[in-house]
Amino acid sequence: RPLVPNHDFINFKMLSGNEILLYLENPTNLRISELCSALLELRKKRDADKIDWTSHEWILLAVDLIKKNCSTYNAHNISNLVTALHDLRIKDIEMWQLLSKCCFKMIFNSRGSSFGKIFDIYISNPEYSNSDFRNHLIIQLPRILHKCSAKTFADVFVACHRSGLMSK
């Protein structure tokens, strides 16, 4: 009897940027964890910061899928998507607004590192969300800060200082 793997998923860490893009050609065939992994790994590839991902048709397909289904994603996936899409410089305001609504619902379930990423990105880019969401992040900061690692704590501190929130 053939051995069936328990976790049959695509390891995007082993693929080149072009191979990852080929998988993103039809993102509906990917699980959400695979989509997150593909976007996270794509942002790490050599010269990824020189490419305009906002005009790439397969990235836009992935963004459309995210916009349709983001309300069903868990806090870890939302955090990974926020990080990957920010690093890929995706500026779709509708997507960022939808992701902020998902973050708003899940902020109580997020880990310190996830909260730190979300806080840094949304506070540093006010066009991504409304002021109510950013105020909610600021209010939740004391409750979640003790869960953060030293690096995440430092990143949150820098984001607060850069945005002029040290008095709040």
Image: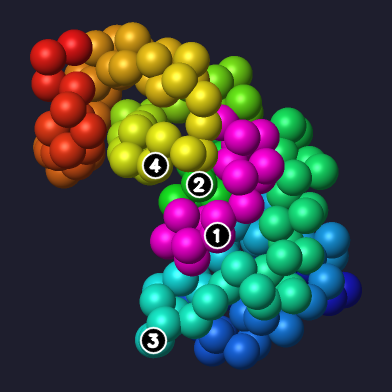
The residue lying toward the viewer, choosing from 37 and 141, is 141
Q: Which mark sits nearer the N-terminus, 3 or 2?
A: 3
- Label 3 sits on what residue type? Arg
Query: How far is disc 4 from disc 1 in space, using C-alphas?
Result: 12 Å
Q: Which mark sits nearer the N-terminus, 4 or 2?
A: 2
Query: How far is disc 3 from disc 2 in space, using C-alphas?
Result: 20 Å
Return the residue at label 4. 125
Q: Residue 46, labelled with which disc?
A: 3
Q: What predominant SS class does the magenta segment belong to?
A: helix
Q: Secondary structure at mark 4?
A: loop
- Label 1 sits on what residue type? Ile
Would you identify the image quadrant in which residue 64 lies? Answer: bottom right
Where are the magenta residues, as a range?
Answer: 84-100
Q: Secondary structure at mark 2?
A: helix
Q: Is residue 30 above or below residue 75?
A: below
- Label 4 sits on what residue type? Asn
The residue lying toward the viewer, choosing from 141 and 148, is 141
Query: How far is disc 1 from disc 2 in space, using C-alphas?
Result: 10 Å
- Label 2 sits on what residue type? Val
Using the rendered image of the protein, determine whether residue 7 is visible from the camera's viewpoint.
no
Q: Residue 90, labelled with which disc?
A: 1
Residue at the image point whose x is 41% and y is 82% from the top: 50
Residue 4 relative to residue 91: left or right? right
Return the residue at label 2. 82
**121 inside magenta stretch:** no
